[in-house]
Image: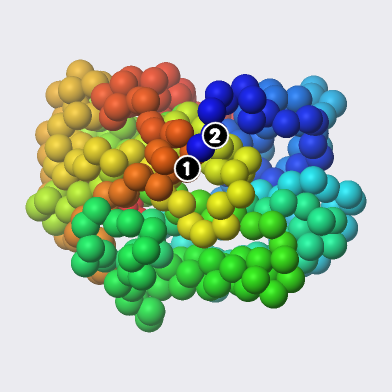
Amino acid sequence: MLTGWSEMIENSMRILIAGAAGFLGSHLTDALIAEGHTVLGVDNLCTGSLENLKQLANEPRFEFRQQDICVPFDPGRLDYVFNFASPASPVDYTRLGVETLMVGSDGTRNMLEIARSSGARFLHASTSECYGDPLQHPQTEEYWGHVNPIGPRSVYDESKRFSEALVMAYHRYYGVNTRLVRIFNTYGPRLQKNDGRVISNFMIQALKGEDLTVYGEGAQTRSFCYVSDEIEGILRLSRSEEHLPVNIGNPVEWTILECAKAVIEVTQSSSKIAYQPLPQDDPTQRQPDISKAKKLLGWKPKVDLEEGLRLSLDYFRSTLVDRV
Ligand code: UDP
């Protein structure tokens, strides 16, 4: 088992982060820059935003390149590749269906080739969506999932499942030093305001005094991880030698209705609930079993939902002010 966090911080590395302008990619970039590494961030900006990287404008150890990872490119010598490039919210990946499938196939392959030719270590951002609408609850990493391969969510689910297969193949056949993190619902500052995700929708609706749009009866569950906890788990995994998938998420399970009530409470809003139809194939339950991460990485989340929502309030308030 790994011990102190500071003991795991290694000498300065040159790191490629694909999807650096996204929600998780930008927080990961900040964390690695803060540790003293040099980061080349690439993003085609199809869902990411340069606004998420503006704090690094004068940082000499950070370089940004607008680049679609489906197109091969030469990033120079690298020590580590983090592949976080993909549309990730149901609204975005439904709008960009084919692009989502291609970034998880051609894009992931290009990133793996870059790691292979540099001898760099590799970490791929996978997802709880690999479990689909799970029949096993909570979900352990051994569960193979229950996925509709042709439904509306299939462009994302199968893209991520194919990426996992590709990462394992590059590890087994070519000896690339890979890791797979299965990320569960994560929230916090920099979540896109219009991407339709539940926390961003509810926070913005509550702050505007509008009704909170609960889909179905709100009985479906999710487990929400605050972004700083998620990033710490990912960094710990990046320093481990575990090549099989590891769940990183907060295991406290909430119904969507409970989540709506928590948002109303934290924002002290007078908003009410408005029920809307449940989208097709919306998973009925989702909760990570994080025993493996606890044992292997000495990691568990620290921030509960109410605290995380409070920490996100200023950000969501700032999104209400129109930027010209
Ligand atoms: N949801 C909701 N109202 C919204 C947005 C989402 O009730 O305004 C529900 C959605 O149906 C799902 C859950 O919240 O059951 C989480 O949705 P999200 O899009 O955030 O991510 P998912 O976990 O489905 O990928």
* 107 in relation to 137, above or below: below
Asked which secondary structure carries label 2, the reply is loop
Q: Position of residue 92 (x, y in %)?
A: 47, 57
- For the residue pair 26 and 297, the one nearer the viewer reads as 297
| Mark 1 residue type | Leu
Is the Cβ of the residue at disc 1 closer than 8 Å to that at disc 2? Answer: yes
| Quadrant in the picture for residue 272 | top left
Tell me the residue that label 2 is attached to: 2
Provide the secondary structure element on which disc 1 rests.
helix
Which is more N-terminal, label 2 or label 1? Answer: 2
The residue lying at 35 percent from left, 25 percent from top is 303
Locate residue 171 relative to residue 23 in the image: left or right.
right
Measuring from the top left, give residue 277's x and y in whole percent.
17, 60
- Outermost residue toward the front in this view: 1
Would you name the residue on which mark 1 appears?
296
Residue 76 appears left or right of 80: right
191 lies above or below 179: above
Query: Is residue 157 something that shows in the picture?
Result: yes
Assess disc 2: are there few (<14), some (14-19) or many (≥20) residues with their C-alpha within 10 Å of its C-alpha: some
Alpha carbon separation for disc pair 1 and 2: 7 Å
